[in-house]
Amino acid sequence: MTPAAIVVRDLRKSYGTHEAVRGVSFEIAAGEVFGLLGPNGAGKTTTVEILEGYRRRDGGDVSVLGHDPARSNPQFRERIGVVLQQSQLFANLTVREIHLMFAGYYERPRAVDEVIELVGLREKRDARVKTLSGGQKRRLDLGVALVGDPDLVFLDEPTTGFDPAARRAAWEMIRALRSLGKTILLTTHYLDEAEQLADRVAVLREGRIVREGTPADLTGGTEETEIRYRRDGREVLLRTGEPTRVLNELTTQALAEGRELEGLTVRRPTLEDVYLLLTAEEDDA
Amino acid sequence: MRLFLHQLRYEQLLFWRSREAAFFVFAFPLLLFVLLSSVYTGTYLGKPAAWAVLAGILGYGAANTGFAGLALLLVGRREMGFLKRVRSTPIPAHVYLSAVLVSMLLIFVFQAVAVLVLGKLLKSTPFPHQALSMLLVILLGAAAFAAIGLGFTSLIRSAEGSSAAVNFVLLPMAFLSGGFGPTTHYGRVLRTIGDVLPLKYFVQLVYAIYLHNHEIWSKPGSIAVVAAWGVAGALVAIRRFRWEPVEG
């Protein structure tokens, strides 16, 4: 078993009377890509910011690369890379200059040109930041987080606001990071993103983990298959654990009546469906 | 030390790359000097009026660079999420902030030299006889106003409003303190308000050194007021300075 990069035990944090994180525990193995999912206000950001060393916890134990991030020291910060969701870099520096500025903060930085190559900005190396497109700026964000050659990378909503092509490109980059052996903690509200990238995911709701496992575990957890078709212009939705039998009955009947099952679809639930199911219970509570 | 020099180098690069900063912080006081020294004529305190204008502009420059320039720079970086990001890297907070402060100090020293050269060329104003006292007072003023600026950032909640907030303080203070020329003809109320402002005491120090060739030590009271304001700013900064954006 690989040693854990992150161990979180019964983590708690309140803001005034509001309990943002209410006893969260999980482990992330070295080299793993871990996705933290959940709606706004579920405690994702608070959890991640405690791990990054930005916030103090009220209770529980946290170990990140063997350090307590609350005693955030330079040795700890040598080994992490952080991509914040809302951060901008200086418009008047070039891509290379920004990388060099950050590289100077680390004891053993990665070669700057190598990092620029890795995030696909080689052609933009000497361009000022203000001339970059939105997607290129996010790649610059990632490059700057990688320039210290971190063992652990925090990615907060890395593809929010991307067009589909840029998202695919970003995913490729994150996969490349994984192949370099980096541990990655990814927060996202795109479920397909978590499904594509994460080895394991945890779904947070109201400060607690409501489900944890591989994306396949989570989707496999519900046995139901959805069958949809239209009858007399009305949508019919069946959920069943025995799709073969139900489909057979449906088609037999339709054939006997000489009807077409218009708009027939059969699908397994995606992580998104599971997620919506898990987080929708909120409204019933 | 290596980290400090690294950051200082990038602070200078960043400053001169940004045309707005380079203009408003560095060049604008020079422009004001040219304008004001052409309207204030005759003599003041027994010296050509241009001398007093020059001393006033050095005062205004200290507040403009140390207080306004630094506060705007830090609020901007805070609100763009940059300071938060720097906090996740190994550069220690005090090294980073020292580099930012010293960079501003350097810019003000360059500016003071530029004002003196410009004065000499345009108005035949002399270089200061008490050069060491002049250098010390420039460093004292820039440091004190930088500390006030550092404290003031905690009062500003957004990047959009920061320029208005800073100028709302800077311009009246400079006017009341003699930054834009002698205040002897001002009414009593205006002068009384000026009496509590650090810039007034700083301008008095520059007058003493530049116009009367006194040493900096000749006015311990003024030094004390400027330094006390600086300490007050630093105390607010220590308690209230934040690295994370106010919104978001």
Image: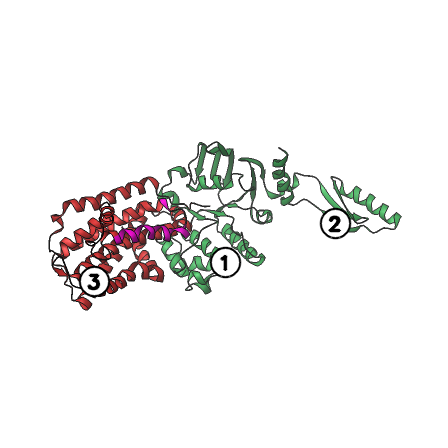
Chain colours: A green, B red
Nearest to the observer: residue A90 or residue A71: A90
Residues at marks 2 and 1, CA–CA distance in whole angstroms: 37 Å
Q: Residues within 10 Å of mark 3 (few under 14, many from 20)?
A: some
In the image, what residue occupies the spot 26% across and 62% down?
Answer: B30
Closer to the eye: label 3 or 2? 3
The subunit carrying tag 2 is: A
In the rendered image, residue A21, in percent from the top left (x then y), is placed at: 50, 35
x and y, in percent, of residue A103 in the image: 37, 54
Same chain for labels 2 and 1? Say yes or no.
yes
Q: Is residue A231 left or right of residue A66?
A: right
For the stretch drawn in magenta, what is the main secondary structure?
helix
Q: Which residues are magenta?
A: B155-175
Identified by mark 3, the residue type is Tyr
Instruction: Return the residue at label 2.
Output: A265
Camera-nearest label, 2 or 1: 1
Q: Is residue B50 above or below residue A207?
A: below
- From what the image shows, is residue A19 above or below residue B63? above
Q: Amino acid at mark 2?
A: Thr
Q: Which residue lies most toward the front here?
A: B187
- Which residue is drawn at the image coordinates 46% and 53% (left, top)? A142
Chain ID of residue with mark 3: B
- Residue at left offset 43%, top offset 42%: A52
Q: CA distance from mark 3 to mark 1?
A: 51 Å
Which residue is under mark 1?
Answer: A134
Give neighbour class at mark 2: few <14, some 14-19, many 20+ (Cα, 10 Å): few
User: Amino acid under label 1?
Assistant: Gly
